[in-house]
Image (cartoon, rainbow, N blue to C red):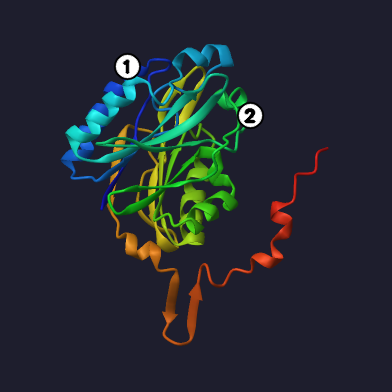
């Protein structure tokens, strides 16, 4: 499978213009023969809203006809892609991500870890956990930005069978160290592929740092940039590499297994409730 990581600007509060951006980049990805493209967080809406009321008109329900338009783009370009959007239900608003293919929305995710930043100050906390979805024969886990700063949900996705974690982000200027360290660390810890698609540009006083990357098992950086320009990264991946958690570095002498060597019986404090101060 060829994976494309799209680093792009986003038009604030303009869904239709952002769908046109998606179409443009999908054309670029298809020209490179990509099978999967990963777009940034809040790709359809923008991020730096100042209230829930300001953001709500730019949120979509999953049955919005614009998702049918996005599915037609997936069919036209013969690939799957993930992208961020604001999801609305009757009473709730979520920072969400969707996996879209030629047949429609394959599945979606609602952001669980919410920093005090941008729209995340005003949305509801995700309530559907960390599901795994299939695109062709590859198992994809969805996550959004700040989620990746916590090793636990990334391990949950790995234990669920993810070959790839598709992370849409809006890392602002000042977060380039996170962009540099976190993706290879999470791919190494879980022996899987990790695609981090960050946005660029400026929005309501926020600048975004780019620094997108594609990492492979054991934290190998397959493609990356330290630029804040619009661009597309690509890398060939073999999902079988992610499925084999047994690593034999020196035959018969140095063998590790990322999952079998775990000792969850001593990890109790990880799942203890937070202590409120």
Counting other residues with Cα less than 10 Å from the Cα at mark 2, is it few (<14), some (14-19), or many (20 or more)? few
Taking the view exactly as shown, the residue that stands out farthest to the right is 277
Q: Residue at x 69, y 54 (%)?
A: 270
At a point 28% along the width and 40% down the height, the residue shown is 80
Instruction: Name the one closer to the observer, 42 or 70.
Output: 70
- Looking at the rendered structure, the number of numbered marks drawn on it comes to 2
On the rendered structure, is 213 left or right of 88?
left
Check the picture and name the quadrant holding the C terminus.
Answer: top right
Report which residue position mark 2 lands on. 116
Residue reaching furthest bottom? 252
Q: Crowding near pointer 1: few (<14 within 10 Å), some, many (20+)?
A: few
- Mark nearer the N terminus (2 vs 1): 1
Gap in angstroms between the C-alphas marked 2 and 1: 28 Å
> In the depicted view, which residue is nearer to us: 229 or 243?
243
Find residue 270 and name its label.
Answer: none
Q: Quadrant of residue 248?
A: bottom left
* Front disc: 2 or 1: 1
Left or right of 274? Residue 209 is: left
| Residue 194 pos. (x, y %) | 42, 51
Estimate the x, y position of residue 198 in percent, counting from the top left.
42, 36
SS assignment at label 2 = loop
Residue 138 position within the rendered picture, expressed as x and y whole percent measured from the top left: 33, 53
Using the image as rendered, state which of residue 255 and residue 202 is in the foreground: 255
Q: Position of residue 269 (x, y in %)?
A: 74, 56
- Circle 1 sits on which residue? 16
Q: Is residue 262 left or right of residue 98?
A: right
Residue beneath the point at 57% across and 19% down: 91
């Amino acid at each position: 499978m060829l994976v494309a990581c799209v680093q792009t600007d986003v038009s604030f509060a303009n869904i239709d213009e952002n769908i046109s951006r998606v179409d443009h980049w999908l054309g670029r990805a298809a020209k490179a023969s990509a099978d999967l493209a990963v777009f940034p967080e809040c790709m359809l809406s923008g991020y730096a809203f100042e209230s829930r009321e300001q953001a709500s008109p730019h949120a979509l329900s999953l049955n919005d006809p614009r998702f049918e338009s996005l599915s037609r783009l997936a069919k036209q370009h013969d690939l799957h892609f993930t992208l961020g959007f604001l999801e609305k239900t009757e009473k709730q608003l979520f920072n969400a991500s969707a996996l879209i293919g030629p047949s429609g929305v394959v599945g979606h995710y609602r952001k669980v870890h919410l920093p005090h930043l941008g729209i995340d100050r005003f949305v509801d906390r995700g309530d559907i956990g960390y599901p795994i979805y299939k695109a062709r024969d590859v198992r994809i886990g969805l996550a959004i930005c700040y989620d990746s700063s916590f090793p636990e949900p990334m391990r949950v996705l790995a234990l669920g069978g993810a070959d790839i974690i598709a992370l849409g982000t809006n890392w602002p200027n000042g977060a380039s160290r996170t962009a540099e360290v976190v993706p290879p660390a999470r791919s190494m810890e879980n022996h899987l592929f990790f695609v981090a698609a960050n946005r660029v540009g400026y929005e309501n006083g926020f600048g975004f740092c780019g620094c997108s990357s594609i990492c492979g098992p054991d934290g190998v950086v397959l493609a990356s940039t330290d630029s804040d320009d619009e661009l597309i990264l690509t890398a060939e991946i073999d999902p079988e590499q992610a499925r084999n958690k047994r690593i034999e570095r020196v035959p018969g002498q140095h063998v590790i297994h990322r999952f079998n060597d775990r000792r969850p019986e001593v990890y109790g404090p990880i799942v203890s409730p937070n202590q409120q101060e």
